[in-house]
Amino acid sequence: MSGLARAVAAEAPGSVSVVGAYADAALWPEDCRQWSATPLAAVPYRGLLTVGAMRRCLRTVLDSVADRGAAPLVHLHGLWDAASLTLASTSESSRIPLVISPRGMLEPWALRHRGSKKKLALTLWQRSQLVHAGLLHATSAMECEGFRQAGLRNPVAIVPNGIDLPADIGDLGSRASREAPSSRRCVFLSRLHPKKGLPMLLAAWARLRPRGWTLQIAGSGEPRHEREVRDTIERLKLDGVTLEGDLRGADKWRFLATADLFVLPTYSENFGIAVAEAMAAGLPVITTRGTPWQVLRDEQMGWWVDADEPSLTGALREATSAPSAVLAERGGRARSHAIATYSWPAIGRRMLDCYRWLRGIGPTPTDIVFE
């Protein structure tokens, strides 16, 4: 979200304001720096009390837009949360053009996870909000198809996520800091969440125990699931598997740039930003058909397999037995594709064109589909 806000603001200075909530006050001072100069009104998350605070913030932003004589447009990211409920409870919101990015939250796996609460939200406000949105945003054609299967017939803008590339991205492709082939690294970097498939990955890794390889898992998330992952590593006696914690910024890119292989065994992703980042760092990628990354298979940049243990095991066996030169060649193709396709300036221009179309001041972008 911060990358998109910055990218759109760079194309249309002064046009973007952000209203949101944060859950961890200790992390917020660091997190808010990623928004750069984008005006930001954020409140602490306090359950349903958050809705009232966010409504006041939104009211202030809308008044500011009106004072400038401009026409407002609201882009909602995510479902089921305080931001969505804030819009549903704001009286004039029905008159404001609305873009919704479900961010994978309409995928079948996501709908089943804590499904009773989501069914209640759909009944109370979420389905009406989705149906009446002027534009839905999908990050892939696969996610757009999910919208249609959910019965949504709105226009859809298919615009991928962008990635924040480090200034020295050109150096990452050299792989100069890679360890010797006798100690190669397979890495996972994402949220530690049940849908990411880590137990399946650990079971596949235990079956293979590839000689000369380590598996490093980076990320944070649900404490209970993190304990489950840690217990599984101990139970399976996976000595070469480690948990690296949450990595950000330069630490994240170094973690990726010095690896040999990336794996994301997820059951469901609308996009999978970690895949794009790994590709930009020059890594071949193993992921599942629960993601929209068929290009990995089609362009020989990695493996795109069914989200089950036998398929994942087969991909890991092929990848970890491949010579370093073969993996590096696949990673080089991945890096070139990611840098050309997922830079934020290009993504910002495409999304701004969609906003202009929705407000009736621009032609229909090629990214918008109606069927």
Image (tube, grey):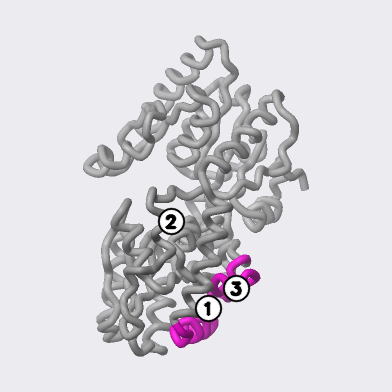
Cα–Cα span, label 1 and label 2: 35 Å
**Mark 1 or 2, nearer chain start:** 2
Residue 205 in the image, given as x and y percentages of width and height: 39, 83
Residue position for label 3: 300
Residue 360 falls within the magenta-colored stretch? no
Categorize mark 3 by other alpha carbons within 10 Å: few (<14), some (14-19), many (20+). some
Q: Looking at the image, is mark 3 or mark 2 nearer the viewer?
A: 2
Residue position for label 1: 308
Cα–Cα span, label 3 and label 1: 21 Å
Q: Are marks 3 and 2 in contact (CB under 8 Å)?
A: no
Categorize mark 1 by other alpha carbons within 10 Å: few (<14), some (14-19), many (20+). some
Q: Amino acid at mark 2?
A: Gly
Q: Which residues are magenta?
A: 295-323
Residue position for label 2: 170
| Residue in the image at 58% along x and 68% along y | 296
Give the camera-side residue of 4 and 156: 4
Task: State which quadrant residue 216 falls in.
Answer: bottom left
| Residue in the image at 55% along x and 66% along y | 333
Residue 78 in the image, given as x and y percentages of width and height: 50, 44
- Which numbered disc covers residue 317? none
Classify residue 295 as left or right of residue 19.
right
Residue 359 in the image, given as x and y percentages of width and height: 67, 25
